[in-house]
Image (cartoon, rainbow, N blue to C red):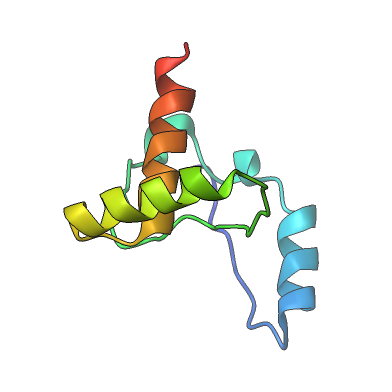
Amino acid sequence: MKKKLNIPNFKNEDEEREFWAKVDLSEYYDANDLEQVSFPNLKPTTKPVSIRIPEYLLNRVKEEANELNIPYQTLIKQYIQKGVFSAK
């Protein structure tokens, strides 16, 4: 650690955002000071999308999701993820 970083009490998020935008953390920390962390309960940010698919295809996905006892939107997300990551 190079020098101590004094973090003030912030009145609101805008004030905090402005503080962190101006601070150069390399003046206070070395790479050796960093520790790896994980956030197992952090859910990824999602964004709703709208797509048009044939009704028969949606019905088939719903049937399969029902057989697997999972929501059909979850199954669609799994299919998309599998397709995206296996395409590489």
Let me know if residue 26 appears in the view.
Answer: yes
Indicate the position of residue 31 as horizontal and vertical percent values.
46, 31
Q: Is residue 46 above or below residue 6?
A: above
Residue with the most extreme left position:
68
Residue with the most extreme front position:
56
User: Is residue 67 left or right of 28 when viewed as pictured?
Assistant: left
User: Is residue 18 left or right of 5 when viewed as pictured?
Assistant: right
Let me know if residue 39 appears in the view.
Answer: no
Rendering quarter of residue 62:
bottom left
Indicate the position of residue 12 as horizontal and vertical percent values.
72, 85
Quarter of the image that includes the N terminus: top left
Indicate the position of residue 63 as horizontal and vertical percent values.
31, 53
Q: Is residue 6 above or below residue 54?
A: below
Of the pair 86 and 33, the residue shown nearer to us: 86
| Residue at the (72%, 88%) spot, across then down | 11
Of the pair 11 and 85, the residue shown nearer to us: 85
Of the pair 67 and 27, the residue shown nearer to us: 67
The image shows a total of numbered marks equal to 0
Indicate the position of residue 72 as horizontal and vertical percent values.
38, 57
Residue with the most extreme top position:
88
Q: Is residue 83 above or below residue 57?
A: above
| Residue at the (34%, 42%) spot, across then down | 35
Rendering quarter of residue 54:
top right
| Residue at the (70%, 45%) spot, across then down | 24
| Residue at the (78%, 76%) spot, across then down | 15
User: Is residue 44 left or right of 22 when viewed as pictured?
Assistant: left
